[in-house]
Amino acid sequence: MNVLFVYKYLTLGGVESVLRARLRALEGSRVRASAWFLADGPGRIMFKDVKDSIGVGSPRDLLHLTDRIRFDVVCTIDTEEIFPVYAEIPGSPGLVIESHSPYRENRVYLRWLKRLPVGAFWVPSQHQAEQIGRRLKHIAPVRVVPNIIGQAFLAAIRPFPEPLSRPRLGWVGRLDAVKNWALLLDVASRVKQHNPSIELHIIGHGDGHRSERNLYQAAKKRDLLGNLRWFDGLPPSAMPRWLDAIRDSGGVVVSTSRHESFGLSVAEAMARACPVVAPNAGPFPGFIEGGEHGLLYKPGSSKDAAAKVLQLLHDAEARKHLGNQARQRVLAEFSPQAALPHLIRALETAVSSA
């Protein structure tokens, strides 16, 4: 079986991480997988060990690829740009549309799909299925296909090699309103009142200098500049060790997202046995049972989120317990061994219904 995954971007984002994990997990299986991106970018470094399985170019360039390779299934991830050329792909492969974006404006295209022979819609969580299912179930089935967490995050836990004297509060996401970095600063400000030594580590980029300036000014207003460490991005290979540093500093990973389709950065933190604090909304209650795999706070409440963070900062046993339980939950649901059979079955169904 030949499958082609198509995505707009080649950045250092969550979808790219999922695609790389899929390509690696499918190696040696009965599925031959490739990925096609419409625009090149810094995310190419993520695929250096599977570089022969990816291509970059326009939808028309993609057609040249399909002249040479017959695909049984084409899975497009929030990439409506290929719809006009789909009918020209030889062999009439099955069409799967994956909805991973938490941004509502990026899902507008889902309204205009009645004329396409969609075999199925795939989503990474039951929450995302509920978000899109009401308008799409009359077109094709909506199926939850669990994300696969990259092997680097699932590797054996090793202590961070350097001594860490200050607890770290970790956060990953775009510097925008959906990821809600402003709430994070409010949480950090409240935490600092009780723990002045806290370090706030943010990994995220925005829309250029405006986002950076807004972050600087907001952090300055809250007297957090001395506590803040901001990274526009880290090499993918460095992310597991960054999470190890958060864990071994006695720290916590926090999510402040208003909308998520899955919450990959939180799941990756859990895979590294980091204690996590996330909003009690969206996909998070689906894989974080409050008090067992992490702590959930009232959405939008910096007071409640900060209280949950402080609870963990002051309780080493709770951090260790939640971290270990979180890792076991991720291994059980999102490791290649657990999630790959779901992906292969979904692909087989797409082929049989094409």
Image: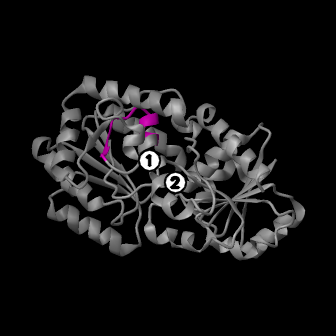
> Type of residue at label 1?
Ser
> Type of residue at label 2?
Gly
Q: Residue furthest toward the left?
A: 193
Decide: is 260 above or below 159. Answer: below
Depth order, front residue of 306/345? 345
Picture residue at 58% right of the left edge, 55% below the top? 16
Instruction: Pinpoint residue 243: horizontal percent, then vertical percent.
Output: 41, 40
Mark 2, residues whose alpha carbon is within 10 Å: few (<14), some, or many (≥20)?
some
Depth order, front residue of 12/199? 12
Horizontally, residue 141 falls left or right of residue 89, namely: left
Q: How is the rendered protein coloured?
A: one colour
Residue 272 among magenta residues: yes
Picture residue at 44% right of the left edge, 65% below the top? 103
User: In which quadrant of the rendered view does residue 27 lie?
Assistant: top right
Residue identifier under label 2 = 14
Magenta-highlighted residues: 268-280
Mark 1, residues whose alpha carbon is within 10 Å: few (<14), some, or many (≥20)?
some
Marks 2/1 in contact by CB < 8 Å: the verdict is yes
Using the image, tell me which numbered label, if any, was put on residue 265.
1
Instruction: Pinpoint residue 119: horizontal percent, then vertical percent.
Output: 70, 58
